[in-house]
Amino acid sequence: MKYIYLFLVFLLFQSCNKEVKYVKNIVVTDSIKIPLREDIINPNSYIQPYWNYNEDLLSFLSNTVNDTIFISTYNLKTRLWKKKPLSIEGKNQVYSEGAFSHLSNSKIIYFPNITPRALIINENGEVVNSYNYSDGYHLNYFSQNRNPNIYSNDSSFIFDLIEYNSLSNKNTYKNTDLLGIYDYKKQKLNKIIKYPDEFQNKVWSANDIERNSIVLNNKVYLNFTKSSKIYIYDLKGNLLKNSKVNFDKIKEAKERVQNKTRNLLNKENNGFYFKIIYDKWRDIFYRIAVYYDTNQEIKTMQDLMSVIKKRTIGIIAFDKELKIIAKNKFSTNEKISENIYFVNEKGLNLMSYSDIESEELKFITLTVK
């Protein structure tokens, strides 16, 4: 009997340590080089620039110079650049730098950082509509998401929301809404989706509440940087499903402390889930993870620098039911960056690290095969 028991324990141990094999893999299949026009500044020279893309366009926001901001747009089909000026003041003012999303090839929706407005701007930089979605300054677009996925139709637009409540108060995670639905005709903002249970009865840092959402088929797919799970909600804010879509190397996040540097180091030590991205050509999602492929604890900036070459980008492909299709990881040596990307018929294109003085942008194409 003793030997049978030991044998069963051995089998259990083996099954727990068995690596899951997926039917498909995520592999490098191509690379893309985009030459920069002489008057286009390399977006790598900015710290976390605002940017956006659609099927045809890849766009970047410049810093403000003499009350003017520029959106530089590269057409992926014609391979031509266009530079559009936006004015901080005057008839077509955009108020400040902010996040933006392509509604079409000729219109964007723009969210200034300093005021709760959504501006519809045409290809000439003219503000054709302005929507004030809040009477006060207690909420705004969630500007930590530098590349918003804004869902818009004839009646409303949906965006990631930030309510300015204290992160050191546990009630914040009970009472704060995460998504805004603005009705054009009623000129009314409806707020939905609270923080899920894993956030409750604790306090979290600004790093841990980072998130992004994708609205697809009247469902909201929600990614939190600290969470191993993806959450699905309906447009009334009801939770439909959640499931782990994760890498084992990414640890459970620690609660907020009063030291910002310590919170940042905790995030790097644990690893995090940067974004989810939808691929309409394959009808799947990608989840981008960032972690250090080492057992060394990161407690100081010196620790962080010592493991920097172990920095790893993990990619998980999953379907609309949160079933994992494929996984792979890419080391820093392959010079893949998570910060800027686009999806096309070939797959997921992640920017490759390059010198900020480089006269071209480089992308690595990853394909599920």
Image (tube, rainbow, N blue to C red):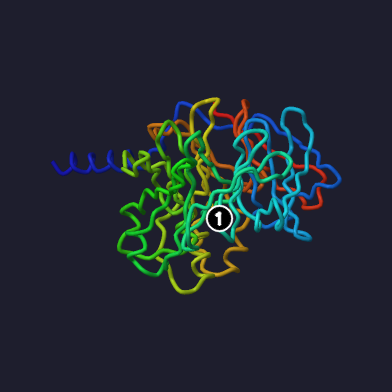
Residues 93 and 58: in front is 93
Residues 86 and 321: in front is 86
Q: Residue 87: name its quadrant.
A: bottom right
Q: With respect to residue 369, does 51 lie above or below?
A: below
Label 1 neighbourhood size at 10 Å, few (<14), some (14-19), many (20+)? some
Disc 1, SS: loop
Q: What is the residue that sits farthest to the bottom in this orientation? A: 258
Provide residue 301's location: percent of width, then percent of height.
59, 68
Residues 278 and 229: in front is 278
Q: Is residue 162 visible?
A: yes
Q: Is residue 44 visible?
A: no
Q: Is residue 98 left or right of residue 282?
A: right
Dot 1 corresponds to which residue? 143
Q: Quadrant of the N terminus?
A: top left
The residue located at (77%, 49%) in the rendering is 42
Q: Quadrant of the C terminus?
A: top right
Residues 189 and 174: in front is 189
Q: Is residue 363 left or right of residue 251?
A: right
| Disc 1 residue type (three-letter) | Ser
Provide residue 343's location: percent of width, then percent of height.
61, 33
The residue located at (64%, 38%) in the rendering is 107
Q: Is residue 272 left or right of residue 218?
A: right
Provide residue 352's location: percent of width, then percent of height.
69, 43
